[in-house]
Image: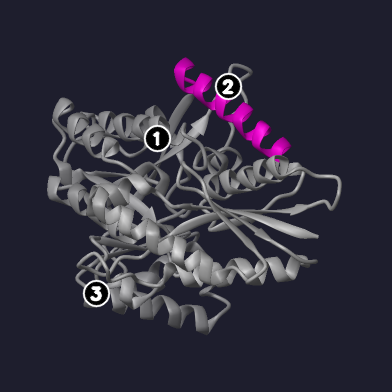
Amino acid sequence: MSVVATIEVNDPDRLIAQHGSESYKLLHSELQSRVRSWARNNDQVVIERSGRISVLLRGDLSHGQVNLAANKLLRLSNAAYEGVGESVKLPINAGFTYVATGADTKEAAVARAATALSHAKRHNQPFCIYSPDLIEHAVNEVEFGNKLNTALTRGEFVLFFQPKMNAVYRNFVGAEALIRWLPSEGKIISPNEFMGIAERLPVIRPLTAWIAKSAIAQCARWQGDASVSINVPPSALQDDALHFTIKDALALYDVEPKRLIVEVTESIMSDDQQAMFERLSRLRALGVRVSLDDFGTGYSSLAYFRSLPADELKIDQVFVRAMKQSAMDTAIVKTIVQLAKNFSLSVVAEGVEDEECADALRDLGCDILQGYFFDKPLPAAEFEKRHHLRA
């Protein structure tokens, strides 16, 4: 069967803001040329008024061939373009669908390809091949997103806190704020059951803003200069809204910016790295600290790492928990610690479950430890009482 592809520039508003509308026209014209060079002689390329590009790939194409074609398109589009006075990449999203011979219309096929394109964008994927369950999946996600919005309005989310301890003196230095969902029926829902979907939906932005404001308000109640860490997904850093939310909350609750730590994962490196780094740099300019969470499991690269605006590196618990049984994992942790120290970063190890592990991490040079050996995540009131945080 033939295939219809629908192609769109990823985040055109950002490109226009960065390079201007005239340069964007040149960039889009270049993308059109690259798509035409990607298409074969018997394929048909149509430039839509919206700027989307539709391509009819004629012939009997297998699923594997469509994947190969999609990856070739990505390689062509991602090559830097020098025609606007600087080196610019042309990131895209694409949706593909098969065309049923004699039983399909062009309009229906283009609509399905657009559905696949939307799915790719929601899931931060470069491309997606249409399947019937995408529609059901999208409907279910929208319904779940509505439930999350309702829960946020009703105040059904709460923060739990897990302590972070100095590796040498074993004294309390801060806490990580961890969200929980407490619906009206009373059963606590862990973030593993809803945050993955939330991060693909618009609700992630107001939800992250709520986490930031609530964590800062809680931190303001604590004695001393203990810090609070919050997890921020890339989808919540796509504009400056979170920056202003944090800035206003720090001022409202009179909390020193250095007491807030924003934890991001290595997945920020798979999106628009430059834009992500700029927004993190703006947070650091406020005085907020930035931590790279789950280090070693994602997109780690020295090329990214050397320019990452961060103050802290957090070793993933997968390596920490495997240290007892694996000399290789111990070597990995040692290497990560040394790397962090070379870049003047403090090092946090999570997943510490016993004293032997805590001692080993201290000896390797870790600065801060976190895990069930010290305490599990607790509701705010119990956490404050347990760790003597109120005057």
Q: Which mark is residue 273?
A: none
Residue 155 in the figure: left or right of residue 196? left
Please name which of the two marks, 1 or 2, marks the residue nearer to the observer: 1
Name the foreground residue: 305 vs 45. Answer: 45
Query: Whole-percent x and y of residue 304?
Result: 32, 70
The tag earlier along the polypeptide, 3 or 1, is 1
Query: Whole-percent x and y of residue 123?
Result: 55, 48
Task: Check disc 1 and report its element: helix, strand or loop.
Answer: helix
Q: Which mark is residue 205?
A: 1
Quadrant housing residue 232: top left
Tell me the colour scheme of the image.
one colour
Residue 183 in the figure: left or right of residue 30? right
Q: Residue furthest right?
A: 102
Q: Residue at x 49, y 62 (%)?
A: 317
Q: Which mark is residue 183?
A: 2
Q: Is mark 1 in CB contact (under 8 Å) with mark 2?
A: no
Task: Check disc 3 and report its element: helix, strand or loop.
Answer: helix
Task: Check disc 2 and report its element: helix, strand or loop.
Answer: loop
Quadrant housing residue 57: bottom right
How many numbered circles does the render carry?
3
Task: Please state the extent of the stretch shown in magenta in the rendering.
Answer: 135-156
Residue 274 seen by the camera: yes
Query: What secondary structure predominates along the stretch shown in magenta?
Result: helix
For label 1, count other residues whose C-alpha is less than 10 Å away and answer few (under 14), some (14-19) or many (20+). many
Alpha carbon separation for disc pair 3 and 1? 33 Å
Residue 273 drawn in magenta:
no
Q: Residue at x 51, y 74 (%)?
A: 323
Name the foreground residue: 387 vs 200. Answer: 200
For label 2, count other residues whose C-alpha is less than 10 Å away and answer few (under 14), some (14-19) or many (20+). some
Q: Which mark is residue 341?
A: 3
